[in-house]
Image (cartoon, rainbow, N blue to C red):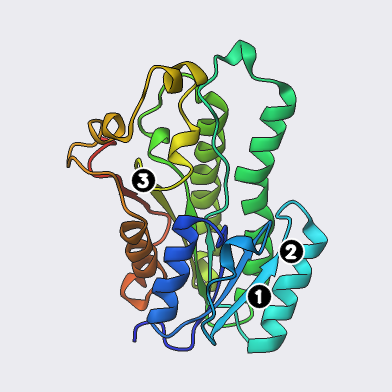
Amino acid sequence: MKQQEKVFIVTGAGGGMGNEVVSTLLSEGAIVVGIDISLEGMTHITHENFQKEEVNLLDSNRIKEVFKQVFETYGKINGLVNLAGIAQPSTPIQDVSLDFWNKIIGINATSIFLTCKEAVSYMKNQEGGAIVNVGSVSVARPRPGLQAYIATKGAVEAFSKALAIEVAQDKIRVNVLHPGPAETQMLVQFPSEKDQENGLTLDDFKMSVPLGELIKPTDIAEAINYLLSDGAKMVTGATLHVDGGRSL
């Protein structure tokens, strides 16, 4: 198994995409620590190599505590996957409140800074590591009304590339994965109330994907597994689109 006995921390592990990433890594022989704002979405994962933690990803002290606990328990942290995030219902900029802007910047971008900061502090003292930060195809193909969300995902990409060159000398790899429209609960949170009232369906999202299908959580999980693996040992600072051609 490619990830035998490696230790990975996965944020947003309670979501549909997070569940699939956790399951894939466990099937590859890894030890996985899933963290999320609530344990509810992880209660059904009972694998002996899975540990779940309730974490507010904007609580820097709690994040420090969890990373320290993981390192002390297993003696290493081989990888970090940042999946946690929230959507923006399509909204004209004049209707976006400062409170919402600060909230989405915090959850989608600041949380990645906080977790990467802790991961790097441990990976520097071992034989490297791998970080995968999940962005969005909307960075490459913006749509109206998603300006706050896209800003956060653009920040994720820029931050990840900057971090990749900073920590390359420590054999720490940092990459970005941009999913396209995916079969998750988050997808239905992007349309505006008007779009929902007009009957916008999943088929409408499928039509925006050149390959004609929504991206499945398994597609994302397999790509993340690759980026974390030794097979990607020379891949860093890259942006991988798993979007069925949506970014073209």
Residue 208 lies, with reference to residue 241, above or below; the image says above
Tell me the kind of residue under disc 1: Tyr
Q: What is the x, y in percent for residue 110? A: 67, 46
Q: Residue at x 64, y 80 (%)?
A: 125
Tell me the kind of residue under disc 3: Ala
Label 1 CA crowd tier, 10 Å (few <14, some 14–19, many 20+): some
Q: What is the x, y in percent for residue 166? A: 56, 58
Label 3 CA crowd tier, 10 Å (few <14, some 14–19, many 20+): many
- Of the numbered discs 3 and 2, the one sitting upstream in the chain is 2
Camera-nearest residue between 220 and 202:
202
Q: Residue at x 50, y 37 (%)?
A: 154
Residue with the mark numbered 3: 182
Choose top left, top right, bottom left or bottom right for residue 224: bottom left
Give the quarter of the figure containing the C terminus: top left
Residue 53 lies, with reference to residue 213, above or below; the image says below
Q: Is residue 234 visible?
A: no
Q: Marks 1 and 3: in contact by CB < 8 Å?
A: no
Q: Secondary structure at mark 2?
A: helix
Tell me the kind of residue under disc 2: Ile
For the residues labelled 3 and 1, the Cα–Cα distance comes to 33 Å
Q: Secondary structure at mark 1?
A: helix
In the rendered structure, the answer to whether residue 9 lies left or right of residue 222 reads right
- Of the numbered discs 3 and 1, the one sitting upstream in the chain is 1
Residue with the mark numbered 2: 63
Choose top left, top right, bottom left or bottom right for residue 27: bottom left
Residue with the mark numbered 1: 122
